[in-house]
Amino acid sequence: MASIGSLSAPWDAVGDRLRERGLRWTPQRRTVIEVLAAADGHVTASELVERCRARDASTIPSTVYRTLDVLEDLGLVRHAHGADGREEFHVLPLEEHGHLHCAECGATWEIGEERAAEVAAAFRSADGFEVDIGHVTLVGRCRECASAS
Ligand SMILES: [Zn+2]
Ligand SMILES: [Zn+2]
Ligand SMILES: [Zn+2]
C-alpha cells in the first residue's frame, strides 16, 4: 500500500482499523475521513454530512453516522453536547477543554486544558467524581450579561 502521506498521522491506517470493525472501506467512508481530517477540531454530524455531500453528492447520512460511531470506538473522534444537547464531534487529538454558553446573548467559549482540569479537580476532591468536562456545555450567563442586569 502506497498510501503513506495521503492522510495525516492519526488517520493513516484508518481504513484497516474500520475493516477490523466490520466496515468496508468505501469511497464514501474515505470522504468522511478526509473531511474529518480537514476539520478544525469541532464538527457537528449534520455539518459533516453537508461537507461530505459537497464532495460526493451520493453521501448517505446513515453511513456518516455509523462511521462516526466506529471512529469514536477507535478513539479518533469524541462526541460532546452543545447547549441544546445536540451532538458535536471533537476530532482528535485535541486537548481536553470545556465549553461555556451564555443563555442570554448566545455566545460560546472554550475553556482550555488547565481550566478544565481545575474544574475536574474540584469535583474529584469534593465528591470523588471524575467529571468528563469535555462532554458537556456549561450553560449560564457571561460577565457582560450578568453585569447588565
Ligand atoms: Zn470543544
Ligand atoms: Zn453524550
Ligand atoms: Zn452573554
Image (cartoon, helix red, strand yellow):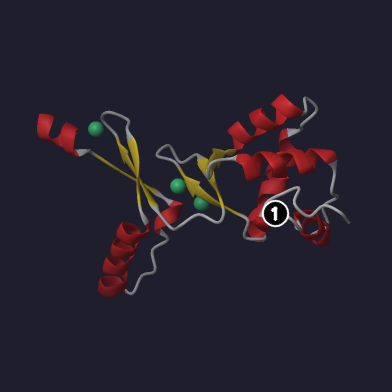
Left or right, 18 with respect to 127, comes to right
37 or 65, which lies in front?
37
- The residue type indicated by label 1 comes to Trp
| Residue drawn at the location 58% of the way across and 40% of the way down | 39
Q: Farthest residue toward the right? A: 1
Q: Position of residue 40 (x, y in %)?
A: 53, 41
Instruction: Give the position of the N terminus as an image quadrant.
Output: bottom right
Q: Position of residue 129 (x, y in %)?
A: 36, 70
Q: Position of residue 41 (x, y in %)?
A: 53, 45
| Residue drawn at the location 81% of the way across and 59% of the way down | 16
Q: Is mark 1 within 8 Å of ligand 1?
A: no
Q: Is residue 149 visible?
A: no
Residue 51 occupies which quadrant of the picture? top right
For disc 1, the neighbor class at 10 Å (few under 14, some 14 to 19, many from 20) is: some
Circle 1 sits in a helix, a strand or a loop, which is it? helix
Instruction: Give the position of the C terminus as an image quadrant.
Output: top left
Left or right, 116 with respect to 70, comes to left
Q: Is residue 15 visible?
A: yes
Image label count: 1
In the image, residue 65 sits, relative to residue 51, either above or below, namely below
Left or right, 73 with respect to 40, comes to right
| Residue drawn at the location 67% of the way across and 38% of the way down | 35
In the image, residue 83 sits, relative to residue 9, either above or below, namely above
Q: Position of residue 80 (x, y in %)?
A: 49, 49
| Residue drawn at the location 17% of the way across and 33% of the way down | 144
Instruction: Provide the residue designation for mark 1.
Output: 11
